[in-house]
Image (cartoon, grey):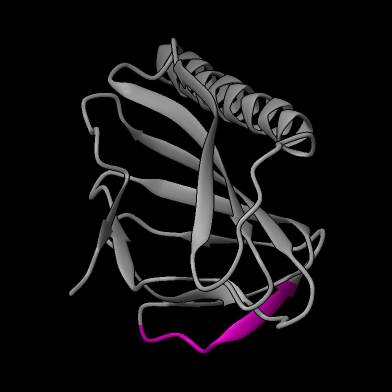
Amino acid sequence: MSNSVNVRKTSTRRIVSIRSILAAGCAAAALAIASPAIAHGDAETVTPNFSHVIPNIPGKSLIAVVVDYGPGGTSPTHEHAKSAFIYAYVLSGEIESQVNDGPKRVYHAGESFFEEPGALHRVSRNASKTKPAKLLAVFVVDTDDKALTTPVK
């Protein structure tokens, strides 16, 4: 009987943790829509949007950034912090992405994808040469990790 109670308590804690993460991500998305940063040319502009320690997951934080791509804008091939699980949500425009050896795919406004810890983000770019695009990236990461993104040479 006590085993059953412990399983229920653990499951309830996980549900509460997931709800907390999703609620923080939704709040970050709402704030990101008003982000003033704009990218022009070949590069992206990354604007910090939200950062908070997750109180019920010791050692973890939730960090959100908005990535603005001007027409034809790209990010170099990169890796993220080894602890980072990333949820990416396209706020506007179209983003072409390739993670690890997966297929290249174009994501439209309202679509999302994720990156597992340790993934290589081979392609991340605005799929349009004429219109801007905007992406919200939400990281669940070890609180001590400071470098969220590292270009791969």
Residue 33: image location, x then y, percent: 79, 39
Up-down: is 76 above or below 105? Answer: above
Q: Residue at x 17, y 75 (%)?
A: 153
In the image, 18 versus 68, the foreground residue is 68
Query: Considering depth in this image, is 127 or 25 the residue closer to the camera?
Result: 127
Q: Residue at x 71, y 73 (%)?
A: 107
Tell me if residue 38 comes above or below residue 79 in the rendering: above
Q: Position of residue 84 (x, y in %)?
A: 34, 45
| Residue situated furthest left in the rendering | 153
Residue 120 located within the stretch drawn in magenta: no
126 on left or right of 115: right
User: Left or right: 67 with respect to 52?
Assistant: right
Point 41% across, 48% down: residue: 85
- Label count reads 0
Position of residue 46 relative to residue 10, above or below, is: below
Task: Write down the region rendered in magenta.
Answer: 101-107
Q: Residue at x 37, y 86 (%)?
A: 101
Vertical relation: 24 (above or below) 139:
above
* Residue 73 place in picture, x, y as percent: 57, 72
Q: Quadrant of residue 12?
A: top right
Q: Position of residue 90 (x, y in %)?
A: 71, 58
